[in-house]
Amino acid sequence: NIPLCLCVIMAASSSTGSATEPPGLETQWREIDNLNQQQLRAGDSWYLLDKRWYDQWKEYVHAGDQNSSSYPGKIDNTELYEDLDSYHLKERLSENEDFVLVPAEAWHKLLSWYDMMDNQPPLERKVVDLPSTVKVEVYPVEIYLCLSSNMESTVSIRQHFNVSETAESRLWMRSTDTSSERLRNLNMTILDSCLSSGMVKYTHLPFTPLNSGHLLCYDSYRGPPGVCGLTNLGNTCFMNSALQCLSNTPPLTEYFLRNSYLEELNFTNPLGMKGEIAEAYADVIKQMWSGRHYSVVPRVFKTKVGHFASQFLGYQQHDSQELLSFLLDGLHEDLNRVKKKEYIELRDADGRPDQEVAEEAWRNHLRRNDSVIVDTFHGLFKSTLVCPECNKVSVTFDPFCYLSVPLPVSKERVMEVFYVSLDPTAKPTQYRLIVPKAGRVIDLCTSLSQATGVPPNQMAVADVFNHRFYRIYQADESLSCILDRDDIFVYQLSSGCVDQDGEEVVMAIYMRERSHYRDYGSGSNNYGTSLFGHPLLMSVPRAQCTREDLYQLLLKRLAAGVEPSGKEEEDEDEDEEEEEEAASCAQANKRLPGRLRNTEKQKKALFTIQAVNSNGTTERGMGEVDAQPYIAIDWDPDMKKKYYNENEAEKYIKHQSMDVPHQQITVQLQECIELFTTVETLEEENPWYCPTCKKHQLATKKLDLWSLPEVLIIHLKRFSYTKYSREKLDTIVEFPLR
Ligand SMILES: *[C@@H]1O[C@H](CO)[C@@H](O)[C@H](O)[C@H]1NC(C)=O
Ligand SMILES: *[C@@H]1O[C@H](CO)[C@@H](O)[C@H](O)[C@H]1NC(C)=O
Ligand SMILES: *[C@@H]1O[C@H](CO)[C@@H](O)[C@H](O)[C@H]1NC(C)=O
Ligand SMILES: *[C@@H]1O[C@H](CO)[C@@H](O)[C@H](O)[C@H]1NC(C)=O
Ligand SMILES: *[C@@H]1O[C@H](CO)[C@@H](O)[C@H](O)[C@H]1NC(C)=O
Ligand SMILES: CC(=O)N[C@H]1CO[C@H](CO)[C@@H](O)[C@@H]1O
Ligand SMILES: [Zn+2]
């Protein structure tokens, strides 16, 4: 086999040495930025540019200094190529992470200003107009040709393989290693034929060992028909699982395998999909039930679905139920036997017996909707509305295609938090707590209190992100603000050391490391800093809010992390006693606060204290007044290396509550159906017009299952929506097999 890539990316004529003098930085930025705003137009060329180079360039032009160290150098796309022999684009690169796209004009400007690394071909790509979107086709279809013992090609491919123009040839689409599908219509566009990279074979008739009309080695696999996998085309499990469910619905599959659908296909029904969905579906089912394949690639089907419902076009995750619903609708209309949909006046039940009204509703349904989908999957709901004022009862019967049942929602929630006790030698401890879902932050503290014995009012709760407090919570805030993925820290606050005023301040404390750079020019104490470690919350008597007192308090508080991390080799004037003192200071020896202070006065302070804002920087936000004081502990890098053990300080331990196997709540399917059929009161936005009271009423509504289809589709509503999040309920639902 000689795989060869038809889509050769040609190197543009060499650009070396052609660089022109670039304009000023500000102008460069403005020109490129303007061009980048350009709309995508089908047929235009855009270029891939390494994101890192682009960022570097942006930094450079923004620095406003021609001589700055951020000069990006020649355009360098090295990271985007698979290898530097073929200059093939690496797979799975993503826009704005690995590369940026710039329009042709911007590219040529940049190229003339900066030139390109040796021999790198530009990565030019065309804008294509797809049914639902216009985009730059970063990965064009690449067609590989195989010249195995008996395969060849047409047109340019003929030339390549030296096949005479008159020889008959065929084009095959390779689906899996062992199965192929013939491309009969050579007039189709690449998009319509659903080709994607690496899938075409040609056969050259004279050389093909013909038997039974199949040119290509079909699988010899003869397994049970229908027991057949579906290849994942990239996050298409939502589609494949729906297809597997339908494929294993005997009445529907028999209908397709018997070719009954051919008689009922309607190519012109405006509500349908030109018969294309039904045909594509039929193809998948026939392949799956042929017994010839271990697995099938539902590529054509997927592309068709994408044509009609562009939300399914890409390769992202989708909701399986959404796809199923779309598919059942599409199949239904493509196969609807009703030619003329008449308007049907709905009659009120008017006290007639249920049986009669239900039969009428079903007859009316069939006058508009009559297909194999209706035969197989449609049933009738009975819905009963009662007016709260006049007690008028209204009964209607409505067809359904599936039951969307809710899951009983647990009123409790499991939360994992890190508890930071006052004991400086104790490490943060991770707890798993059960809290009321609708509870407040204080409920979280109460739950933690039961595990720690610390009163809930001596705790402070915060969301820690990136060494800062992303948010510090008040006790009465709702727990629903806290997402499961947040890192929640709960701090024990001291209570004992209240001074005469009894006034305490809760301080937020960040850890920062200074960079060596100092702005000597300004004479001020400017230095760069970066945050590290876990921040702290600590309550401090107001009287002790002086730098000196805080220093001592913090030194004690940090003890777990602050310890000499190695032998002090070169501290010149330290005698043994001092060394001992330094060590004990590091362990925040409670016995020796006085001596500690003395030691610290003799020695260089381990850190300094700065007032900062909630971001941990010294710039104040616009007009911001933090109710909450924030301070930063600034470490000199040498001191930090010596006294602050980062490894030690970042460690945490797991409380035994973390070991309890995650309790799985199981529910019975029956419970879900009961919940579905419980009486509910209509919501304000969706009232019912009571014909007796002649006004909208918040009626009570009850749904019942009146008649069931041959095959009942039950959809479990596993997503629970709150104002803040979409939560997936992983409750196990048990259902009877019979
Ligand atoms: C940049 O450096 C060059 C040579 O080192 C010097 O001649 C030029 O004046 C500098 N330009 C700026 C804007 O500092
Ligand atoms: C095609 O034929 C030409 C001349 O007959 C020959 O030079 C060339 O090598 C052939 N190419 C291939 C791919 O066989
Ligand atoms: C392809 O297009 C040509 C010209 O439009 C037409 O004559 C031919 O019948 C088409 N072939 C198929 C298979 O549709
Ligand atoms: C297809 O459906 C449309 C609209 O429902 C109808 O007018 C037409 O007769 C149907 N065609 C066939 C072949 O059944
Ligand atoms: C913190 O940073 C954000 C984003 O950079 C900024 O909008 C905000 O004003 C800053 N807050 C303070 C207190 O400076
Ligand atoms: C359940 C179902 O598919 N009902 C359809 C019956 O036909 C009418 C009119 O064609 C549609 O509006 C319904 O959705
Ligand atoms: Zn009423």
Image (cartoon, rainbow, N blue to C red):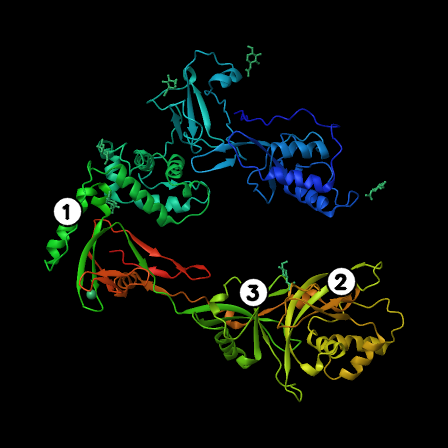
- The residue tagged 1 is 363
Asked whether the viewer can see residue 406, the reply is yes
> Quick one: label 2, few (<14), some, or many (20+) residues within 10 Å?
many
Mark 2 element type: strand
- The residue tagged 3 is 487
Q: Nearer the viewer, residue 384 or 563?
A: 384
Q: Is residue 402 left or right of residue 103?
A: left
Give me the residue at 16% from left, 46% from top: 364
Q: Foreground mark, 1 or 3?
A: 1
Q: Mark 2 belongs to which amino acid?
A: Arg
Mark 1 element type: helix
Please say if 702 is above or below 295.
below
Assign the C terminus to one quadrant of the image: bottom left
User: Mark 1: is the Cβ under 8 angstroms from ligand 6?
Assistant: no
Q: Mark 1 belongs to which amino acid?
A: Arg
The answer to which image quadrant residue 16 occupies is top right
Q: CA distance from mark 2 to mark 1?
A: 80 Å
First in residue order: circle 2 vs circle 1: 1
Q: Nearer the viewer, residue 498 or 82?
A: 498
First in residue order: circle 3 vs circle 2: 3
Q: CA distance from mark 3 to mark 2?
A: 26 Å
> Quick one: label 1, few (<14), some, or many (20+) residues within 10 Å?
few
At which x and y percent is residue 103? 60, 34
Q: CA distance from mark 1 to mark 3?
A: 58 Å
- The residue tagged 2 is 514
